[in-house]
Image (cartoon, rainbow, N blue to C red):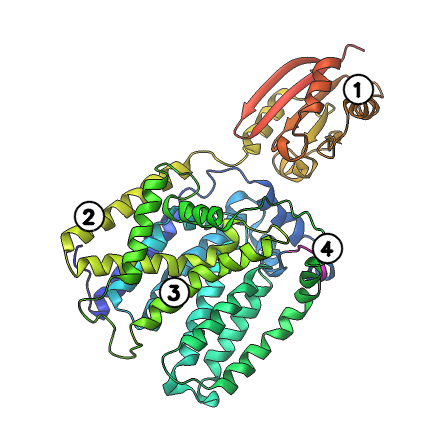
Amino acid sequence: MNPIPNSPKATRIVLLGIIGVAFLLRIATLTTQSLWRDEVDVILFSSWPLYDLLAGLFIKGHNGPLFFLLMRPWRTLMGDSEFALRYPSVAFGTMVIPLGFALVRELGLSQRVGILLTLLLATSPYLVWYGQEAKMYSLLLALITFAFIAYLRALRPKIAHYSKNLGNWTAFVVATSLSFYTHILSPLILVVYGAGAFLYPSKINWRVWLLSMSCLTIPYIPLVFWQISLLHENIVSGHPFYSLKEELLTLLQVYSSGLISFVGKPLIVYYVFLFLVGLFLPFMTQFNHDSFSLKISYPMNILVVWVLLPPLLIYLISLRVAVFEDRYLIYITPPFYLLVVIGLVKIAQRSRMVASFCLGIILMCNMIGLWQQHQPIKADFRAAATYLTRHATPSETIMIQIPYLKYTLRYYYPGDYPLLEGLWTNDGKTEAIVDAEMTALTMNNLTDLWLVVSEEEMWDSRGLTRAWLNRHAQLVDEAHFIRVELYHYHWNR
């Protein structure tokens, strides 16, 4: 492993350079992907009246209004271009880099460990992907990482007196409360905070701790009522059920190679190896910094709790209501990558050459993962809309399957064209029912219809709508794009 400068001035320069690289990696390809339906939601939800947006806290399944509240003035100033909608995620994603360094220092680890962690955070294909998406996940990651830093500072025994430590506890409570309003599953991190207090190697002020934790109950009240009610209802969440093994494998895959698994299990095994080395291989030398030193066991213990408890809790919740998506757990990436870095450091204490080789593999795979994600992956409504602009007339009817995608289509293909919603057939509709409903929809002298198909399996997995159109109309044109298909049908009437 190449020596990393350990002087404060050199470290600042290197850190600034890594922050710059992180920003460039996120912004350089910001508009490569077409907006997908979840990203267009930011326009829809942030346009709601303020009362309705805040009332979403009491609506089952609502993710929280904070990101959309932030996007209201941003959209007013910057508009609704792809670049403008995604730029806040670039900013929050880049902010995570210095926060990661601060987290390392707060855990009592060395500057070199901090630099290595920022390098992995900056180049992680997974974090770059969500640092380019018009969603709340980069904000969630930044908030929880900041809250964890403030929490560790607040626990310090030297400043345990409440009056001297009010700023740290306030920052922790505010950042954690804001995370509640960013994503509905973020309160799972409270279990990690609790474990962090009980595992702390020095005496803490439990009265202050309990007071601060009780302050977190107030912002959580709007969420707790409908979340608890879910446990007593038969809710179909729309998410597939994952076993705990499937959850962990999914997380390992995206953390190691990003959204596209170009190596597969060998890279997962490699990351697990470094993770376990970081966790279990003993240190040969002390590497904590001098200003504030925790026992070596504490960083290991709290990082493991931070990495493993949230996935376990989501699995237990999913036994009742399936809720797992890897992006909901984006906030466990800092401790995961930090344990991998500690593994590299422990190897370097025995052989710098081997450690350099191991780090080189990670960086090379990160670059390959970033290149893979540069290719079109999301449903390409941008290209589909361009094709419609060239080949469809404003009077021709469009049917979209699934109907919710009409917002994405209208973003790229605005106008007053007639729009029909494709039939929901996954409820077991028979062909006879489909025939009757499609006949009713296509009456009134309809001569031309464009069927826009994307994520068809979620709405019409048997393809009954297309089958009906193929029987009753003439297919005169079709075009295929990434996860979007266009079919032009004509009736001779």
In the picture, residue 275 is in which quadrant?
bottom left
Mark 3 — residue?
303
Task: Name the quarter where the C terminus is drawn.
Answer: top right
Q: Is residue 174 magenta?
A: no
Q: Earlier in the sequence, mark 1 or mark 3?
A: 3
Mark 4 — residue?
233
Seen at 63% across and 59% down, the residue is 65
Q: Is residue 81 visible?
A: yes
Q: Amino acid at mark 3?
A: Leu
- Does the residue at mark 1 contact the one at mark 3 (Cβ under 8 Å)? no
Q: Nearer the viewer, mark 4 or mark 3?
A: 4
Q: Nearer the viewer, mark 2 or mark 1?
A: 2
Q: Earlier in the sequence, mark 4 or mark 1?
A: 4
Question: For numbered disc 3, what is the local secondary structure?
Answer: helix
Q: Residue 374, percent across and down?
A: 41, 37
Mark 1 — residue?
446
Mark 4–mark 3 distance (CA, rounded to whole Å): 35 Å
Q: Earlier in the sequence, mark 2 or mark 1?
A: 2
Mark 2–mark 3 distance (CA, rounded to whole Å): 25 Å
Q: Earlier in the sequence, mark 4 or mark 2?
A: 4
Q: Residue 41, percent across and down?
A: 63, 47
Q: Is residue 490 left or right of residue 6?
A: right
Q: Residue 117, percent across and down?
A: 31, 59
- Closer to us: 447 or 187: 187
Q: Residue 372, percent across and down?
A: 38, 36
Q: Nearer the viewer, mark 2 or mark 3?
A: 3
Magenta highlight range: 58-62
